Amino acid sequence: MPATQAFRRTLAVIAALPLLTLAACGYGSEAKDDDTAKVAAGAKKIDGLDSVKIGYFGNLTHATALVGVQKGIFQKELGATEVEPATFNAGPSEIEALNSGSIDIGWIGPSPAINGFTKSGGKSLKIIGGSASGGVKLVVNPKKIKTLKDVEGKRIATPQLGNTQDVAFLNWAAEQGWKVDAQSGKGDVTVVRTDNKITPDAYKSGSVDGAWVPEPTASKLVAEGGKVLLDESSLWPDKKFVITNIIVRQAFLKEHPKAVEAVLKASVETNKWINANPDEAKAAANKQLESDSGKALPADVLDPAWKSIRFTDDPLASTLHTEADHAVKAGLLEKPNLNGIYDLTLLNKVLKAEGASPVGDAGLGS
């Protein structure tokens, strides 16, 4: 079976698996309502919608969504149209939920966005905005790995076959001159695909020697005695690369542009508030994580994790194109046609109203 077919079959299997406390919709768990997110008296519905369904991960790299829900910023902009948040643990399940209409808008990493767009022939989604950059690190056992060269021959965890961090690690390993079979993860370095929730236990047990992971998993490993050997941002121009995008179901964008614009306005307002009030924003994100999962992050994990993430409305489109090239080089993706993956019209309308500069789509706009 060709590598690309195997990869697609793997994604299909992953997407079909029951993923950690799934809600009745079958895709993600419903986030709990917060007292700050009530519909204001006298508010009107947008586009006649009763609700807008928003998806995101319980990761700090999705803090725009976490804070926007927690502080009621999305609800404020949507008026009497109720925000219905749902949390996910993996990109394929969120893409499946988007395609089925179980969510309308989602916060997601670049690799699942690329896969969702290309597998649908460019018909399933549009990237309509940026959210975050950075927040990904290679954390290792300092007793076993002291230098970057020492990674050779070791077992390194990534979250999932073909996910954003998996692609990044495979590309970095190739640049070191190491050969790794992308499908099996075997080679000069062994890649162990491990759910972020399980990775700290795998590290403690010694079954992996390190991990290329997003926050807060990276800082959880550091709290267990791990050492940050490499921050992925150091590998990118200006230390910026997309880690979280905002995507929308194309039919929803076409039918309800006012609702999409309201969500984008809320996202821009949230990022502005996060950057102006980092400590309060960090606490709000942690409070929403606790509401969604039942467990807040301890300070020794939350504080360093938060410092490594940059919140931006710019989708950093040129870096998404580069990440797609990395997946192609790794043999996980046929060269994709990404023309039309972006529609930044509404975002730039919101930014103009805010007096901010427009953002670009690297020639990949609709």
Image (spheres, helix red, strand yellow):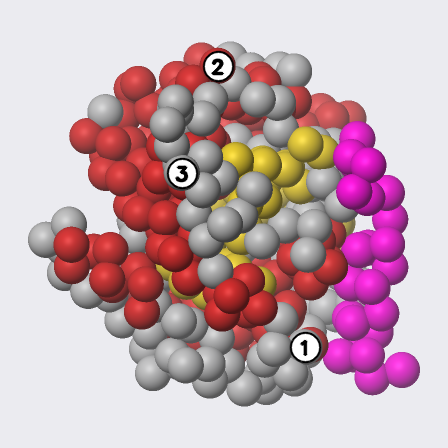
Label 1: how many Cα within 10 Å (few below 14, some 14–19, many 20+): few
Q: Is residue 264 above or below residue 366?
A: above
For badge 3, the amino acid type reads Lys
Q: CA distance from mark 2 to mark 3?
A: 19 Å
Q: Which residue in the structure is indicated by mark 2?
A: 35
Q: Residue at x 28, y 32 (%)?
A: 274
Q: Earlier in the sequence, mark 1 or mark 2?
A: 2
Q: Earlier in the sequence, mark 2 or mark 3?
A: 2
- Mark 2 residue element: helix
Q: Can residue 234 be seen from the camera position used here?
A: no
Q: CA distance from mark 1 to mark 2?
A: 38 Å
Q: Which residues are magenta?
A: 1-26
Q: Foreground: 267 or 295?
A: 267
Residue 2 located within the stretch drawn in magenta: yes
Q: Is residue 361 above or below residue 135?
A: below
> Do callouts 2 and 3 mark residues in contact (Cβ within 8 Å)?
no
- Mark 3 residue element: loop
- Mark 1 residue element: loop
Q: Earlier in the sequence, mark 3 or mark 1?
A: 3
| Residue 120: mark in rendering | 1
- Count the marks: 3
Q: Residue at x 83, y 64 (%)?
A: 12
| Residue 44: mark in rendering | 3
> Is 116 on the left or on the right of 258, as rendered?
right
